[in-house]
Image: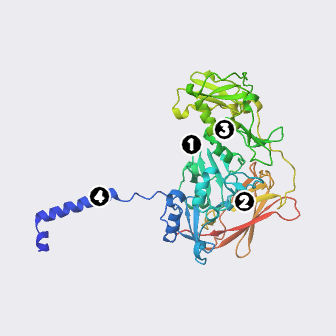
Amino acid sequence: MLAKLLRTPSIIVVLLLAAILLAGCDSTDAAPLPEPGTYTVDTVFREFYASLGGRDTLGPAISALFNYRNKECQYVQNAMMCFDPLAEGIARFMLFPLGDSLGIYEAPEISAAGNLVVDGYPIYEEFEEIYHRLYGPLYVGRPLTQPRYNGNGSRIEQYFQNVGLYRSVNDPPGEVHLLSYGVFACSADCQFVPPQSAIVTANISSASQPYLSQVARLGGLNVFGMPLTNPYVAPDGNLEQIYENVVLYSPQEDTSSLQLRPVALLLGVPVHPPGPELRSQAEGVVFYPTDGDLGYHVPLVFDYFIAQHGGREISGKPLGEISPFNGTLYRQCFVNYCLYFDSSAAESLQVRMAPLGLDYLNQTQAAPVVESTPFALEAQTIHMVANPGTPRIPADQSQRFDLFVVRLADNQPIPNIESELTLTMQNGIQTTYQLPPTDTQGRASLTVPPIEPAPLNGTVISFKVCLNVPADSPVCKSDSYLIWNFQ
């Protein structure tokens, strides 16, 4: 009966039309083409990958599965996942500590302040949620730096052993992402291009920002503006840092004791004598008494702003009444900052701080000064990192070596240091190269040609970089990389 129906022309036409329609649906609903440079997450990692947030958190897979130090590993945009078949339980899966190879190190604070402090490093307040979501030290790893402001990347960032966290200053508060550790480590072996905002750069010369966490609790960079200087020692011996709208300072040994400089007074903003209370909240103002029954009227919108951003202790006393300033702007100054009211702006943008920090910087020309203090170049006084450009490289490709040297006491780069690179083959044959002197950022790089004759696939090449400095014992770092001919 079925065969007879299929021989009926009308039935055949219907079936053909249905097939064409289904084919059309398949082509319309087909999965999008994979993003260039991406791979499928290997089955060994799928549950682990999903448990950490999958693509939204770790980014796409950017390499195939490979073996590294007796583990099965795979690069994703923001990390390197590894599986140890010899381990048990939760220890079988890990995020490899790529941060240790980035050459990034910053000493912990003696008296770190913040909601969450790990090993002397305050975790930036907006990073706390994702830090806990990734199980803290288990998958994020130990902190490597304080929270820091990266002016080139326009982001707040903090480096950890396994991942890096950042928040773009243009993003809404609380929107946090991971830096592209995996792309940086995989280097030329991976073809994936991450978003510009997530790129990890080799330049880590930017100083730490000891006040970032406290600024976040007071309202963040959207309120206080961007840092205009690195922290520096002011003439009074305090640590000082200029932001666009305020000037922050604290004792050098206790950055948790944050205060604001009386920048409005320092800039010569006129101080008007206080007067009696003449208006009430019904008229849109709050009276701030400053001298007995005398004081100043503060608009309710300013009073609300002050309360939301640290209170009167942070603003200081008013210096006068609100008055027209420029066009649609009205201004009222307090000891530590001035506030604008812009009647033409959107409601959420009508109240903002005036850029007094910029005026203070222009007036004082304050800038961090790094003194070159002689000291002994020894293994105990410096932090030295020597890395291959890529941990796995085909035998016919050149290899890059990167050196980074800073003073251990203050993390300042050490320029003009010469060094020697020694490659050692498995048969014991050695080849020596001279690296160029380190630059002003304490960095030097050298690219060496492919090894001749070409080593076999899987050969481990050992290398050592030693500084050419007078010392009681050689100052060297050793590591290795793998010859791996990708098929």
Q: Earlier in the sequence, mark 1 or mark 3?
A: 1
Do the numbered discs 3 and 2 sit on residues whose CB atoms are within 8 Å? no
Q: Which of marks 1 and 2 is nearer the N terminus?
A: 2
Which residue is tagged 3? Answer: 311
Which residue is tagged 2? Answer: 119
Nearer the observer: mark 3 or 2; the answer is: 3
Work out whether 451 lies above or below 290.
below
Work out whether 140 lies above or below 70.
above
Q: What element carries label 4?
A: helix
Nearer the observer: mark 1 or 4; the answer is: 1
Q: Which amino acid does label 1 sit on?
A: Asn
Q: Earlier in the sequence, mark 1 or mark 4?
A: 4
Question: Residue lying furthest front in this view?
Answer: 293
Q: What residue type is labelled 4?
A: Cys
Nearer the observer: mark 2 or 4; the answer is: 2
Which residue is tagged 4? Answer: 25
Is residue 457 among what the camera can see? no
Nearer the observer: mark 1 or 2; the answer is: 2
Distance in Å between CA atoms under marks 1 and 3: 26 Å
Do the numbered discs 2 and 4 sit on residues whose CB atoms are within 8 Å? no
Q: Residue at x 67, y 25 (%)?
A: 296
